[in-house]
Amino acid sequence: MKNIYRPIEATVEDIIEESPTIKTFVLRPKEHFEFKAGQFIELTLPGIGEAPFTPSSDSNVKDRIDVTVMNVGRITSLLHAAAKNISVGIRGPYGKGYPLEKFFGKDVLIVGGGVGLAPLRSLLFSLFAEIDKYNKVILRYGARTPSDIIYKEAIPVWAKKKKVDLVTTVDVGNPTCDVGDPAWKGNVGLVTTILKDLPVDLNNTISIVCGPPIMMKFVTLKLLDSGFKPKDIYLSMEKNMSCGLGKCGHCRIGKYYACKDGPVFTYEELKEILDIWD
Amino acid sequence: MNNSYYINSTQLSIFLGRLSSNYKVFVPVAKEVAAKGEKKVDYSYRLLSGEQPLIYNSYRTTEPLKSFFTPPYEKLTDYFTAEQHVTAQIDKVIIFGVKNCDIVGHRVQDFVFCEGVETDPLYKLRRENTIFISSDCTDFKEVCHCLSWDILPYPTEGFDLNLTSLSEGYLLEVGSTKGEELIQQYKEYFIPAKETQVSARKAKRENLIERLKKHLLPQNLVSKDTVQGLVRQGYSLDTWQEFMLTCVECGGCNLICDTCHCFLLADAKERIQNEKVRVWDSCLYANYARVAGGANPLKLRKQRLRNRFMKKFDFFVDNLGMPACCGCGRCIEVCPGKIDIREVLKDLAKKLQKL
């Protein structure tokens, strides 16, 4: 019988600093490993512990998995302190991923907050690979300060792609500006403030949101207010996870498990759940 | 109508001895317990080592059945040298004295570990290699309330063989192909049951049910048809706060419950070898839902008590069609804070009726 708890080995080939608290780890798995955008892996620090991450790399590139990780806890702080070429373990892919076929022919609104842009980058790779299947891609991204923006070099490249409309904002402008170019000239305000007058056809749009729970809550409310239907709002739900495959019980949301039934859910599936935003 | 066989007590002891040379046989043992106004005997399972008279447990054991399939701490796999497939040596096990409450409750474990996106290999292999020889209850503890969940004190399915004790021997009812095969393997010990013996069994069962009904009726317990509605509508009531005042977060209720299954998939090192281990967890522990950055959606004990009830009476009703409670009362006995699942549900019902 299949050994479902067995991790495969991967090497950390490169470490990219995205922000003072966020790094992207480029992993090379030693066995065949595939995932779809929106699915997640359980990353093992050998002998120490595991944590779930959604790959931020292109799912069409089969021998490389990037995970973009914020330094917030026990595993992530050890990972941030690690050097290149260490061995890590990967279990997965788990979860359902984004249902791309449901987005064909539509305006795709993507709203990201902070490190929430990580799974969304993987989604963007999937969309860009077959951009003709989608009407347009509208990306609205917010970070706390300019230095907290991730994929800083990629963002201007995406903004220039055909069918892409991209706006970024920061919660707090940073007058002392510390990364690269002069003082931030872009929008200042929470990401909800750049969700006004969206260039979308409400009858033919879906929206995909990913970021801190409080950001997802207020963005959802804003989208509902603007006329988006619950079934067209896709949310990445977060819960404490352990097994990642629907047995350990930790990540229950209502009648679902955030791992095997998610992590991507429509608001329609979640709206009756009493403690959804806790 | 299933086949039933008769075996007298002496023969049963010999039969047990024969079994113990080919199987790991677990039988009930009795322990005197000092308690005021409560039954003076508790039962546990112990590995049989040879020919012995069977101790017939009147009601369920203290420990849950799940310990046989998912022990409290166990190594699941090495890494990175482990194979893609599990090749463990699995013991052939027979468990005597399983009660219907455990058989029904155990459906939750089967659902969790065998269904879904993956099958837990060790659980599945152990399940396939275990024979349940259940038995009728002949008595009940104060905390027993199986009938309130429409669960009978004797099994009608989910067993391999079921024992009923008669005056000088036992009836064994066949419940599965495995059970019939076991009888045939040792057929020299058994004779087909007589009509009178089958009737005697029926009478004993009806007698116990009458006694159990008399015990449960005045308690006015919540039924499985209303319990999901109660926990959903009772979400914001102060019931949760009131009952959590005496909780010491020991996790006993989860650890001893046969429908509770939460575990941590953790990492360990055995000298230089890395391992994944499974450890029982409890949703009453403070950090059960805590995420890496420190946020904790179940920070307060009242949230955790409520979460446990939502899992048992909302989640499983939606996902499995039955509440994850078999009325065995183990959680009531184990709780140092005297939190009683029957009382929590009744409190919800009482308060919601007033609203």
Image (spheres, rainbow, N blue to C red):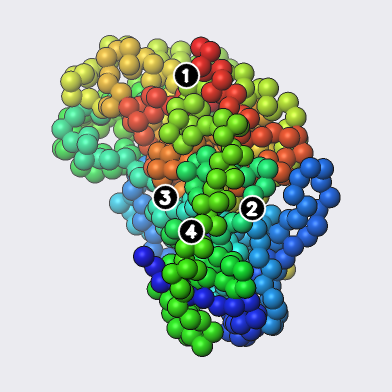
Chain that bears disc 4: B
User: Identity of the amino acid at label 2?
Assistant: Asp
Mark in the foreground, 2 or 4: 4
Left or right: residue A158 versus residue B67 is left
Label 3 vs 1, first from the N-terminus: 3
In which quarter of the view is residue B279 placed?
Answer: bottom right
Q: Mark 4, mark 3: which one is toward the viewer?
A: 4
Q: Position of residue A38 (x, y in %)?
A: 37, 42
Q: Judge depth for marks 1 and 4 and give the one in front.
A: 4
Q: Which amino acid type is shown beneath numbered disc 1?
A: Val
Numbered disc 4: secondary structure? helix
- Structural distance between the alpha carbons of marks 4 and 3: 50 Å
Mark identifier at residue A94 = 3
Residue A13 visible (yes or no): no
Numbered badge on residue B202:
4
Are both tags, 1 and 4, on one chain? Answer: no
Residue A117 shown left or right of residue B312 in the figure: left
Q: Chain under label 1?
A: A
Counting other residues with Cα less than 10 Å from the Cα at mark 4, is it few (<14), some (14-19), or many (20 or more)? few
Q: CA distance from mark 2 to mark 3?
A: 47 Å
Circle 2 sits on which residue? B139
Residue carrying label 1: A170
Tell me the CA gap for discs 1 and 4. 75 Å
> Whole-Å distance between the Cαs marked 1 and 2?
69 Å
